[in-house]
């Protein structure tokens, strides 16, 4: 039982459930039809693990930095460091161990030789350290850094397998990231009684709400343009992606409905707490897999 408790505590410290965000690393692999290449698949798996461990290091740094504020928060006070379940010393040792493990993974996968990919990891780490150190209290800059995290993941995924992502898909991810970033801040503002984040005082509800839905609209427009782009049609030898647009619409509509309710706006929590949203994501994924696989068979 003690082992189970330890696993749960360290899983919460590392924010393992947030690793799903790093699935974006596989997007270039998927849409470049490179998933038939075993080497590329393995490199992406190693890249996913390395990026996930790096994000855990950042979460540990952030929790150590915010430990006193978190203790005053009705939800964050339950985090392992704030609750005293894990000591600062053990958290630092864990972070150092993860750094060593990341280095070994990068060497094993050969990613260390890819200067661009290594720079992306470094940039992601630096941005998030600066975010935790104070930029999270700077309006607009805080949301830019939140959004940049998603964009850097997808760029990293392309670099490690030598694939350039479609400009349209890059814009889809960018707008989707800003949509979630504005939504997160919007809901934190609605929960002012529970939230200790200072930056919410610099925003107005209308500003966050309007920009959130502007980004949602652009996300839909860019995805639609990608689906009918001649290069996309030529690459996949089909116009079938246009029929996945309703899934994208429904996913965004359901996501919006969820954060309009009593939610903190965190993307991972919004997804995992809604079976219908998970089903919609799975349906979109299944339809995309069928289309891409048919393209691979005809290619």
Image (cartoon, rainbow, N blue to C red):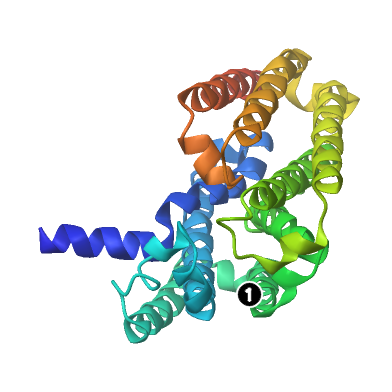
Image check: 210 left or right of 44?
right
In the foreground, 280 or 180: 180
Q: Is mark 1 on a helix, strand or loop?
A: helix
Return the residue found at the far front.
Answer: 193
Residue located beneath label 1 in the image:
132
Q: Residue placed at 83% from the left, 29% from the top? A: 226
Q: Position of residue 180 (x, y in %)?
A: 70, 44
| Whether residue 104 is visible | yes
**Above or below, 125 relative to 20:** below
Image check: 146 left or right of 280?
right
Image check: 195 left or right of 4?
right
**Mark 1 crowdedness (10 Å alpha carbons): few <14, some 14-19, many ≥20:** many
Q: Residue placed at 42% from the left, 80% from the top? A: 100
Image check: 109 left or right of 91?
right
Q: Residue placed at 28% from the left, 71% from the top? A: 85
**Above or below, 155 relative to 70:** above
Residue 148 is drawn in which quadrant? bottom right
Residue 117 is drawn in which quadrant? bottom right
Q: Quarter holding the C terminus?
A: top right
């Amino acid at each position: 039982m003690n082992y189970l408790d330890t696993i749960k505590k360290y899983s919460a410290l590392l924010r393992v459930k947030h690793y799903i965000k790093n699935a974006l690393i596989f997007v270039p692999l998927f849409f470049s039809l490179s998933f038939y290449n075993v080497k590329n698949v393995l490199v992406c798996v190693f890249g996913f693990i390395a990026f996930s461990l790096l994000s855990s290091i950042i979460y540990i740094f952030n929790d150590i930095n915010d430990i006193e504020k978190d203790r005053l928060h009705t939800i964050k006070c339950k985090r392992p460091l704030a609750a005293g379940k894990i000591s600062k010393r053990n958290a630092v040792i864990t972070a150092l161990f993860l750094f060593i493990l990341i280095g070994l993974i990068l060497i094993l996968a050969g990613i260390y030789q890819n200067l661009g990919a290594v720079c992306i990891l470094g940039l992601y780490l630096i941005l998030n350290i600066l975010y935790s150190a104070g930029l999270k209290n700077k309006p607009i800059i805080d949301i830019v850094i939140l959004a940049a995290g998603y964009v850097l993941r997808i760029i990293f995924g392309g670099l490690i397998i030598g694939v350039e992502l479609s400009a349209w898909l890059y814009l889809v991810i960018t707008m989707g990231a800003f949509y979630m970033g504005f939504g997160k801040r919007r809901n934190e503002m609605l929960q002012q009684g529970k939230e200790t984040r200072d930056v919410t005082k610099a925003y107005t509800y209308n500003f966050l709400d309007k920009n959130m839905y502007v980004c949602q609209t652009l996300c839909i427009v860019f995805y639609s343009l990608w689906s009918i782009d001649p290069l996309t049609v030529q690459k996949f030898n089909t116009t079938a992606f246009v029929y996945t647009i309703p899934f994208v619409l429904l996913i965004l509509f359901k996501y919006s409905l969820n954060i309009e309710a009593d939610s903190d706006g965190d993307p991972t929590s919004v997804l995992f707490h809604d079976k219908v949203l998970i089903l919609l994501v799975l349906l979109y994924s299944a339809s995309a897999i069928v289309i891409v696989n048919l393209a691979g068979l005809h290619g």
